[in-house]
């Protein structure tokens, strides 16, 4: 199992717009419709940080979902609206070694 964390450093004052735009964007990602995910916004640390976290069975499953979802014209159009809200972004991918269900 892997965790994919997409971290976006938003421009000053753009968090509210990003939250609203995500409501539209999440409808375009098939992974969101059948898997748990998390959307996080900073409380401390770097201001205006937005994190999208997804889990996948394997790196191959992630790559398949990414090419399917991010390859669509609908996603590309949505992403073109999201990018101007960002200063930077990065992706972290972790292997989940252990997870508590408690």
Image (tube, rainbow, N blue to C red):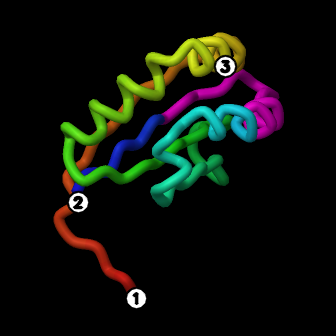
Pointer 3 or 2: first along the chain: 3
Are the residues flagged by discs 1 and 2 in contact, CB closer than 8 Å? no
Q: Which residue is mark 1?
A: 102
Q: How dense is the environment of label 2, judged by Cα within 10 Å: few (below 14), some, or many (20 and up)?
A: few
- Image point (52%, 43%), residue name: 52
Mark pair 1, 3: CA separation: 37 Å
The quadrant of the picture occupied by the N terminus is: bottom left
Select label 1 or label 3 by which is in front. 3
Select label 3 or label 2 by which is in front. 3
Of all residues, the one furthest to the bottom in this rendering is 102
The x, y position of residue 23, in whole percent, is 74, 40
- Image point (49%, 60%), residue name: 36
Q: Secondary structure at mark 2?
A: loop
Pointer 1 or 3: first along the chain: 3
Range covered by the magenta-colored residues: 7-21
Are the residues flagged by discs 3 and 2 in contact, CB closer than 8 Å? no
Q: How dense is the environment of label 1, judged by Cα within 10 Å: few (below 14), some, or many (20 and up)?
A: few
The x, y position of residue 75, in whole percent, is 58, 21
Q: Which residue is mark 2?
A: 96
Q: State left or right for residue 66 relative to residue 23.
A: left
Mark pair 3, 2: CA separation: 30 Å
**Marking on residue 57:** none
Q: Which residue is mark 3?
A: 78
């Amino acid at each position: 199992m892997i965790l994919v964390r997409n971290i976006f450093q938003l421009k000053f004052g753009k968090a509210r717009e990003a939250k609203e735009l995500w409501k539209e964007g999440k409808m375009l990602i098939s992974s969101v419709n059948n898997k748990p995910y998390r959307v996080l916004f900073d409380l401390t640390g770097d201001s205006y940080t937005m994190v999208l976290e997804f889990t996948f069975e394997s790196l191959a499953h992630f790559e398949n979902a990414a090419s399917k979802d991010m390859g669509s014209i609908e996603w590309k159009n949505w992403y073109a609206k999201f990018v101007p809200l960002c200063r930077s972004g990065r992706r972290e991918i972790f292997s989940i070694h252990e997870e508590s269900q408690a």
